[in-house]
Amino acid sequence: MATSQAEPRRGRGRPRTPGAEKRIIDAALEEYGEHGWSGFTMDGVARRAGVGKSTVYLRWQDKDTLLSDAVGSSTAQVAAVDTGSLRGDLHQVATNLFEYFRDPAGWATLRITIDTAGAQQRLGRFTESVADVQVEHVDNILQRAVTRGEAIEGISPNAVAECIYGPVIMQTLGLRLDSRALGPDDIDARATELVDIVLNGVLSGPAYADRSKP
């Protein structure tokens, strides 16, 4: 009796269509960037990605898990830097953020964060997981700086992350309101100024030093 060789089983939870996962991730961010949480649907993501709804649900059970993966994958490399110095690392993080928020995926991520902060009810867990990852990267930057003798123990990675991410977000919102975009030189200058303030402090700048002289 002839026997037939069973076909290898596909891994559970992965889209069967080649390249579907990236298309779905990109589509999810684009959908959110245009429609926000209330208008974000799995059907809309499937249509934009050019796949069946079942393909989306095969990998993600709801829009919370989909957005968690979408935001996490798009922000994974923003703070994952290692230039060899504390100043260089923070400058690269700030530069990456400015460049990231110029991209539609970056703007969608920022909108997700703003929507979550302003919601009366919990929207999902996606922003919490992403924030944890970014703070962890900043903590790694600070620990390397301590090892190199550039920084002392006990600096809060949350505080440093807020000092970098906060100003970049505020500037990004202002630029979008003015319909302006930054070029590479502008981004470098703003990142340099921001890191100078973080590392040197507002009151240690040259203008303050000149005024404090007798």
Image (tube, rainbow, N blue to C red):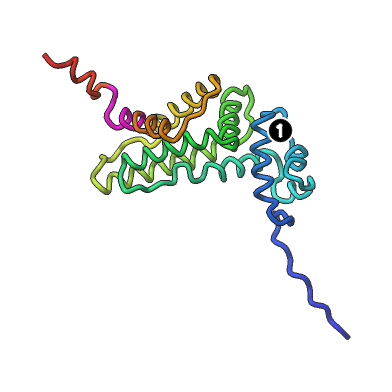
Q: Nearer the viewer, residue 167 or 159?
A: 167
Answer with the quarter of the image where residue 200 lies: top left
Apparent side of residue 29 relative to residue 185 in the rendered image (left or right): right
Q: What residue lies at 36% left-to-right and 29% top-to-bottom?
A: 194
Apparent side of residue 85 relative to residue 109 in the rendered image (left or right): left
Amino acid at circle 1: Phe
Identify the residue at the far bottom of this view. 1
Image location of residue 8, percent across then percent down? 74, 69
Q: What residue lies at 46% left-to-right and 39% top-to-bottom?
A: 96
Q: What residue lies at 67% left-to-right and 50% top-to-bottom?
A: 21
Residue 112 colored magenta? no
Circle 1 is placed at which residue position? 40
Query: Which quadrant would the C terminus be assigned to in this image?
Result: top left
Image location of residue 117, percent across then percent down? 56, 25
The residues colored magenta run 194-202
Identify the residue at the far left of this view. 214
Query: Which quadrant would the N terminus be assigned to in this image?
Result: bottom right
Q: Nearer the viewer, residue 188 or 6?
A: 188
Q: How many marks?
A: 1
Disc 1, SS: loop
Q: What residue lies at 56% left-to-right and 31% top-to-bottom?
A: 110
Question: Is the magenta region chiefly helix, strand or loop?
Answer: helix
Pointer 1 local density, CA inside 10 Å: few below 14, some 14–19, many at least 20 = some
Image location of residue 10, percent across then percent down? 72, 63
Image location of residue 210, percent across then percent down? 18, 18
Residue 200 colored magenta? yes
Q: Relative to 20, is 3 above or below?
A: below
Residue 37 visible in rendering = no
Apparent side of residue 148 relative to residue 1 in the rendered image (left or right): left
